[in-house]
Amino acid sequence: MRLSELGEDFFLKELARRFPTAGEHVVLGIGDDAAILDPPSGERVLLTTDSLVEDVHFSRKWMPPRFLGRKAVAVNVSDIAAMGGEPLGALLSLTVSPESEVEALWQLVEGVDERARELGMSLVGGNLASSPGGMVVDVTVAGATVRKRALMRSGAKPGDGLYLSGKIGASATGLKLLEQGAALAPGGGFLVPEGLREGPIPLAEACIRAHLDPEPRISLGRALNGKRIATACIDVSDGLALDLHRLCRASGVGARIEEASLPLSPGLLAWERAWKRDPVLAAVSGGEDYELLFASRSEDKVERLRGRLDLPITRIGEMTEEEGVALVGRDGQVRPLSPLGWNHFGKQAV
């Protein structure tokens, strides 16, 4: 059935029935003119929003609806994590063609609801609108500060260590594989086109899943904030190089990072070498890793946190007085690192 046959009112009524709102901070969820949230006493509210636009951020050729819903939530919660906050509730705004298949829309909303609950909140409302063109999935997440504090991009000082969670580059590699015809099979497993079968196939599926279903670092952000470990923080959404420049600009400092210390994804390394491309350039400019990049004055506290969370956290360099970002190569040469990464309108603002 198509959405034009079902109608907006019936779809929204059915949505409220299928996805009942729950959560200790939700007073009123889906079904009224607005949701009502009750933040923890004394805390400030964090708000973030992001859009996934068809043929800009995703293609329906390779993005299953359920994963589209899951990713739309995760990329927003990553912003809450970067500020050391706690997610409270999510709004979903869908702009779709009247000819959209209703079952695919239900799968998308199921992905939103599923990921929201995994991350400790609920889908509390949203909007449905008609589009003459492609689909737009817009999610807004409300969060709350912890102990009335929030991490920001500003605050780093010269001499602070620079740290990065997890590994980078898998998502960008996954996107390249998807664009070349690789796909997750509907019933599970991995579909490999002829042109990719000579590559390092065992590492391909993990890269694709990193792109389709990222993991926001909520626990890490909360710990960095609550224990006052980080002086500044940003999530790596548009590429390490570009997001590091943004953190430096906000803090009024520079940075120097070591190529040998960058925690590169095994999948990125294997596939970029198979494609005869530079894995470091791909890793620092690829984006959509959703890891946390942060500055800290206490290496001991970061070390203890690493063990407690069982999460890789790598020191990749330090903040400097000199403006700009420098990359120290494996050969010892120091080169400027440009703000490479994803930008919607072509020209970098940093």
Image: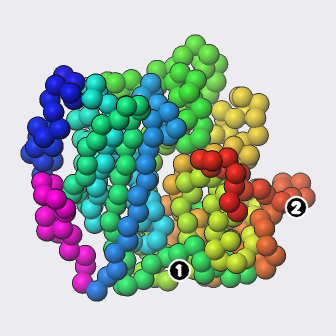
Q: Secondary structure at mark 1?
A: loop
Judge the density around disc 1: few (<14), some (14-19), many (≥20) Cα neighbours within 10 Å: many
Q: Earlier in the sequence, mark 1 or mark 2?
A: 1
The colour scheme is rainbow
Kind of residue at badge 2: Val
179 sits to left or right of 120: right
- Characterize the magenta stretch by its predominant secondary structure: loop
Q: Which residue is mark 2?
A: 334
The part of the image, by quadrant, that contains residue 333 is bottom right
Percent position of residue 121, x then y: 25, 60
Q: Nearer the viewer, residue 36 or 329?
A: 36
Q: Is residue 111 visible?
A: no
Q: Which mark is residue 229?
A: 1
Q: Position of residue 221 (x, y in %)?
A: 46, 69
Q: CA distance from mark 1 to mark 2?
A: 29 Å
Q: Circle 2 sits in a helix, a strand or a loop, which is it?
A: strand
Residue at image coords 26%, 43% = 128
Q: Name the side, left or right, on which 332 lies relative to 17.
A: right
In the image, 284: left or right of 132? Answer: right
Residue at image location 66% in from the left, 50% down from the top: 341
Q: Residue furthest front?
A: 132
Q: Nearer the viewer, residue 225 or 346?
A: 346
Residue 135 position within the rendered picture, expressed as x and y whole percent measured from the top left: 38, 35
> Residue 116, relative to residue 5: is it above or below?
below
* Badge 2: residue crowd in 10 Å (few <14, some 14–19, many ≥20): some
